[in-house]
Amino acid sequence: MRHPHTPCVSLKLLTAAALVLAAVCPVRRTAAADGANASQTTNAARLYAKHCAQCHGQSGRGDGPRAAQLKARIRSFADCAWMAMRSDAVLFLIIRDGSGAIGLMPEMPAFDGQLNEGQITELVSYIRHFCLDRSAAGGGR
């Protein structure tokens, strides 16, 4: 008699089925998909240089040429602890509605109207790379 809490399908059988599916249905990256990702990254880099780097700096460390003129310290995207506490949705809101929208110092302006939702989404993904690039080296400030 089977114990009431024992699953009907063994873990070994599920693992074997997953391996078969992975072999039969591999995820295929196409040159078009790779090109689209590269294009999005290039576009996001241009958007960052135009709208963000003056304050956040080319390296994302909050050391752009305008940073010293502002009252509040500019956030470093290389600060992995701070970045880990912010979801993509929160970063999207900060970019779209300005930093005051989530209770931070209202130094950062809203970019709603200057950037569309797709561009803001690309920027969120792009600024995450500043922390990821430095994670192996201890990143952040």
Image (cartoon, rainbow, N blue to C red):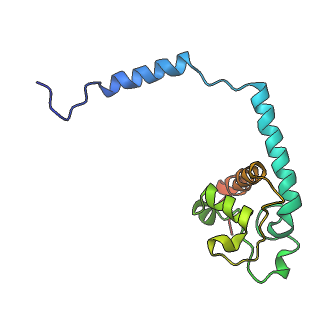
- The location of residue 19, given as percent across then percent down, is 47, 22
- The location of residue 42, given as percent across then percent down, is 84, 45
Residue 80 is drawn in which quadrant? bottom right
Q: Nearer the viewer, residue 113 or 131?
A: 113
| Residue in the picture at 79% in, 63% down | 111
Marks counted in the figure total 0
| Residue in the picture at 63% in, 61% down | 90
Along the horizontal axis of the image, is 23 left or right of 1?
right
Along the horizontal axis of the image, is 51 left or right of 26?
right
Q: Nearer the viewer, residue 111 or 83?
A: 111
Position of 55 relative to 90 (above/below): below
Residue 72 is drawn in which quadrant? bottom right
Q: Residue furthest left?
A: 1
Position of 91 relative to 62 (above/below): above
Q: Quadrant of the N terminus?
A: top left
Position of 46 relative to 103 (above/below): above
